[in-house]
Image: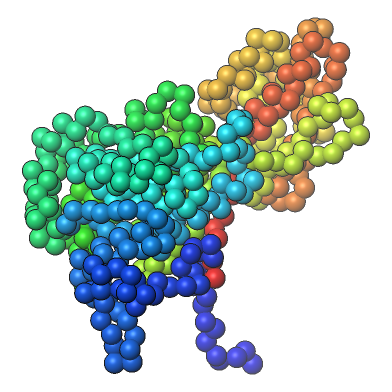
């Protein structure tokens, strides 16, 4: 008989490297060190120090003293601006640290080991750049659209001279878009308190939606190791509501955007499709699990090469981390007894079980035919022999070369036999089904003496990229949690 005892589901909590994972902040000590914090601390009958989480002034003062005491960061925000909970925000930073240190997405080819990140919507609190720079020495660009965010983010950087060289605050647009549509209350600290302002018409929806997030803000040839974002989660002020148990403030512009987080993160995905390799990792926080599913399927459609998710448990609420990349995940090259570069291979995993070697061969053939190369396919041996001129190789290696839409044409129509000329690249691609859903694709150089044989590795790498794009089942969706 199975035990009737309910199994406790282990929920992920704080990241193990988070400085508060072992030692929660001691309010008694902080009150004794910071007279400005002391009035907010009261003691339970058992002598336990507490603060009133529903008091915005108390949560803001706590954030100020934690940043000062534990991170050597001077910080302040005007009334009503979103007040970050330091332990929660640190979890996101450490998750990105994990992504960057994992070997999945290779580092940029530069000797600079210092990581560079882009914080979309850094807010007046500028919390992620301040934490990333002070904890890990990362460099940051933090962007935002509102005057108050830009002004206070800059103030928060300026009062920390040791971080000045690490953080740049960049304005999105020239501000006129929001100037015209946002009522000036945004500059009046008395009235920006979220709970006091429920006028949804302040931001013109079209204006807000048309503001860029990355494209146009990231400069030509700029490279970043990652981007991060805590997006405006909600579609309406009503949806945002107020958690009666806590008060962390948050203005309309910080909390609400047309279409909510789905629309905001979709914009990041769309921009990432344009910017692709300018970032090693694109990441965002997601507020609702249903949106996480929607966004993962958007990423599949966008042809990303890897997706990762995680869950952040923050008190009673959960948030999710979503990360994706267009970089080619590191693949194992099979050992071969033949000289290097004559043989290459990679595996396609996680494909639908019914997808077999023939479909993959067909796509290989179409890819090369699209570039003008000749192909001879042997469906019994599961091979395609490819003969490509220099022009065909150049065409194939061009960035926008993709599996063409000519799939309605049959293999026989497109195949043609041709004797290879000496200055052509000739190689064989073989596809083996290892287990259902896992295919091994091998490439063998046929005429090693050809002057074009040096292109084999690049062409084969490009083939791998094209096939991984074509067969979305290859996407590795990995999620991790911390105990
Ligand atoms: C939820 S707040 C996050 C603030 C801060 N990063 C944090 O985690 O507390 C979202 C921020 O995104 C900003 N924002 C909205 N649209 C933006 C855009 N297109 N580009 C950059 N920032 C934007 C808002 O002004 C707001 O400051």
Seen in the picture, residue 418 relative to 264 is either above or below; the reply is above
Image mark count: 0
Residue at 53% of width from left, 62% of height from top? Answer: 17
Q: Position of residue 218 (x, y in %)?
A: 39, 30
Residue at 21% of width from left, 74% of height from top? Answer: 39
Q: Could you tell whether 95 is left or right of 266 in the image?
A: right
Residue at 69% of width from left, 10% of height from top? Answer: 390
Placement of the C terminus among the 4 image quadrants: bottom right
Q: Position of residue 393 (x, y in %)?
A: 67, 15
Seen in the picture, residue 28 relative to 442 is either above or below; the reply is below
The chosen color scheme is rainbow
Q: Position of residue 244 (x, y in %)?
A: 21, 72
Q: Is residue 255 visible?
A: no
Residue situated in front as seen by the camera: 440 or 192 = 192
Residue situated in front as seen by the camera: 86 or 428 = 86
Seen in the picture, residue 186 relative to 446 is either above or below; the reply is below
Residue situated in front as seen by the camera: 235 or 188 = 188
Q: Is residue 45 visible?
A: yes
Return the residue found at the far right. 337
Q: Could you tell whether 381 is left or right of 258 in the image?
A: right
Seen in the picture, residue 445 relative to 236 is either above or below; the reply is above
The image quadrant that residue 482 belongs to is: bottom right
Placement of the N terminus among the 4 image quadrants: bottom right
Q: Position of residue 143 (x, y in %)?
A: 32, 39
């Amino acid at each position: 008989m199975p035990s009737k005892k309910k199994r406790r589901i282990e929920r992920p909590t704080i990241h193990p490297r988070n400085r508060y994972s072992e030692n929660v902040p001691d309010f008694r000590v902080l009150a004794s060190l910071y007279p400005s914090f002391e009035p907010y601390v009261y003691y339970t009958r058992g002598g336990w120090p507490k603060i009133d989480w529903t008091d915005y002034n108390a949560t803001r003062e706590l954030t100020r003293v934690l940043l000062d005491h534990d991170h050597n960061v001077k910080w302040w925000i005007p009334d009503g601006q979103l007040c970050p909970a330091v332990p929660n925000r640190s979890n996101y930073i450490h998750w990105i640290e994990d992504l960057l240190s994992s070997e999945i997405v290779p580092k940029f080819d530069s000797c600079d080991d210092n990581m560079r990140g882009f914080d979309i919507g850094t807010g007046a609190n500028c919390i992620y750049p301040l934490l990333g720079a002070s904890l890990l020495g990362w460099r940051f660009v933090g962007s935002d659209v509102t005057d108050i965010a830009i002004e206070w983010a800059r103030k928060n950087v300026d009062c920390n001279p040791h971080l000045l060289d690490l953080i740049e605050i960049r304005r999105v647009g020239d501000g006129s878009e929001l100037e015209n549509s946002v009522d000036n209350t945004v500059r009046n600290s008395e009235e920006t308190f979220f709970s006091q302002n429920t006028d949804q018409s302040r931001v013109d929806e079209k204006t807000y939606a048309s503001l860029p997030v990355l494209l146009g803000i990231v400069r030509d040839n700029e490279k970043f190791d990652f981007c991060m974002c805590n997006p405006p989660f909600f579609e309406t002020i009503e949806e945002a509501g107020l958690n009666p148990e806590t008060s962390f403030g948050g203005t309309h512009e910080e909390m609400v955007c047309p279409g909510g987080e789905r629309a905001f993160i979709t914009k990041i995905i769309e921009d990432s499709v344009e910017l692709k390799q300018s970032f090693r990792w694109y990441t965002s926080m997601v507020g609702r699990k249903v949106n996480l599913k929607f966004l993962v399927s958007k990423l599949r459609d966008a042809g990303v090469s890897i997706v990762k998710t995680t869950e952040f448990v923050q008190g009673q609420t959960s948030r999710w981390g979503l990360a994706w990349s267009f970089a080619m995940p590191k693949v194992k090259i099979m050992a071969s007894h033949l000289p290097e570069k004559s043989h290459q291979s990679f595996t396609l995993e996680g494909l639908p079980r019914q997808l077999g070697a023939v479909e993959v061969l067909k796509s290989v053939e179409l890819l090369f035919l699209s570039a003008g190369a000749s192909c001879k396919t042997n469906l019994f041996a599961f091979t395609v022999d490819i003969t490509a001129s220099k022009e065909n190789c150049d065409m194939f290696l061009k960035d926008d070369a993709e599996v063409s839409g000519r799939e309605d044409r049959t293999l026989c129509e497109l195949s043609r036999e041709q004797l290879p000329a000496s200055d052509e690249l000739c190689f064989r691609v073989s596809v083996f089904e290892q287990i259902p859903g896992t295919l091994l694709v091998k490439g063998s150089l046929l005429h090693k003496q050809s002057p074009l044989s040096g292109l084999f590795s690049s062409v084969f790498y490009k083939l791998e990229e094209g096939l991984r794009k074509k067969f979305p089942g290859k996407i590795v969706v990995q999620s991790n949690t911390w105990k």
